[in-house]
Structures are given as structure tokens and as C-alpha cells.
Amino acid sequence: MEITFYGQNTLALKIGEINVLVDPFITGNDLSKDKVDIKDLKADYILLTHAHQDHILDAEAIAKNTGAVIVSNFEIANHYEEKGFEVHPMNHGGSWDFEFGKVKYVNAIHTSSFPDGSYGGQPGGFVIEGEHKNIYIAGDTALTMDMKLIPLHTKLDIAVLPIGDNFTMGVDDAIIASDFIECDKIIGCHYDTFGYIEIDHEEAKKKFYEKGKDLMLLDIGESIEL
């Protein structure tokens, strides 16, 4: 599994020969819009955790360019199906065996509405069990006891957790979340994109290190391989 970070919550996963894009928000992100051309992105599937603009902004353009299947909650999937896109609807607690692995849609505590204010269903996260590696993408969420359910069904190799605070968990709660999910290898997301969520990188990494954990703050376009 190769994971590439494109800012905010945008991730590209290459699992075998399949390309999965998560929460594409690039053209509206001042940190990434001059570094990433969405026309160059590959996507067989686009996973959307919820309907806020900083998670869906480029979904339509990329899906039109690539023919990707949009995977999200029932309401978001219906929204895009009505626009002519191929979709796969899911809901909390449900799982599905895709060609790149098993995906489970899990709880997140947040809100979810489209930029026009219309209802975007309930927010969620994704647990993906690939052929060799497993990843949890939390989406935008507060710390929640439901995270303790994840290691009951999946042993994680890595997790993507929000750390920017204000709208989501901050660093301290993300450390507790890593305990709940029993995963010490964390990619941070949802930070620095705008003023409310700017963080001190060194302090954040130090706090994780002091708890015996590894917090990775990837540069835009940086990749890691599991």
C-alpha cells in the first residue's frame, strides 16, 4: 500500500493496481493548489467521509476525468448518482468487499452538509483491509469511545487522524484515539489549512513520541509505502 498526502484530508492510496482517492480538496486549498494538478490524479474509487466543502470540492471534476466510483454514505452517494456519477452507498457499521479490499464505514462525530446547506447524511470514517495492510481513515471527528470497536475486528497497520483541533480532535485527543484503536503509527491530517487549525509541528510530534508513538506530518505530495 502506497499512501500520498495532498493536504487537509486528501489522500491517494495505491493498493495493488487500484487507485483510491479520499476527500479530494485541492483547488480550494492554498497549501496544495499550486503543487498538485487534479487532472494528473488517478482514481478508480473516490471515498468521501462527509459532505463539507473541504472534503468534496474536487470530487466531481476528478470523477468526470477518471470515471471513478464515488463511495460514501447513502445521502452523499444519492447526491452524486442524481448527477450521473457511478456510486456505491454505505452506512454506519456496514462493510463491502471491493476489488482493492474490504471497506467498513464507521462512526465519526462531526457534522455533514453540502456547501449549499443541504443535508449530507451522517459523517463517517473508513477502515480498509487491503491484501497485506490495514488502514483507518477517521475523517473529521471528535474523540469517541466507538473507536474502541475497531481493533475488535481489524488489526491496524496505520491510521489517519485529524489533529488540528477546533473543528476536530486536537493532538492530545488524537493520542488517546491511537490508544483506543491500538495503532501507534499515525498520519496527521486536518491541520494548517487555515488559521483555526494551525499547529506547532514539533510540539505535536514530541507529544506522540513521548507516548511511544510515531506521528507523521507529510509534506504535500509526499508518499510513504507500507
Image (cartoon, rainbow, N blue to C red):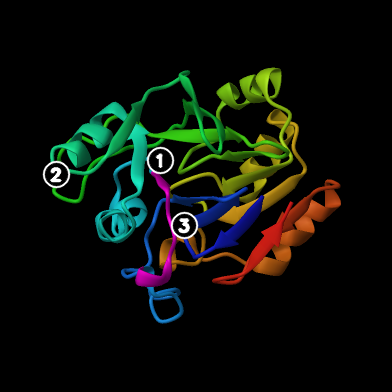
Q: Nearer the viewer, residue 149 or 134?
A: 134
Identify the mark at residue 30; answer none if there is no mark. Answer: none
152 w.r.t. 107: above or below: above
Q: For the residue labelled by badge 3, is the local secondary structure a helix, a strand or a loop?
A: loop
The type of residue carrying mark 3 is Thr
At 58% from the left edge and 61% from the top edge, which residue is drawn? 4
At 71% from the left edge and 63% from the top edge, which residue is drawn? 203
The type of residue carrying mark 2 is Lys
Q: Which residues are magenta?
A: 39-47
Q: Which residue is mark 2?
A: 83
At 86% from the left edge and 47% from the top edge, which residue is drawn? 212
Q: Nearer the viewer, mark 2 or mark 1?
A: 2
46 is within the stretch colored magenta: yes
Of marks 2 and 3, which one's residue comes earlier in the chain? 3
Q: For the residue labelled by badge 2, is the local secondary structure a helix, a strand or a loop?
A: loop
Q: Which residue is mark 1?
A: 49
Res 63 → quadrant: bottom left
* In the displayed structure image, the side of residue 148 where residue 98 appears, left or right: left
Q: CA distance from mark 2 to mark 1?
A: 19 Å
Identify the mark at residue 10; answer none if there is no mark. Answer: 3
Q: Are marks 3 and 1 in contact (CB under 8 Å)?
A: no
* In the displayed structure image, the side of residue 87 where residue 189 appears, left or right: right
Q: Are marks 2 and 1 in contact (CB under 8 Å)?
A: no
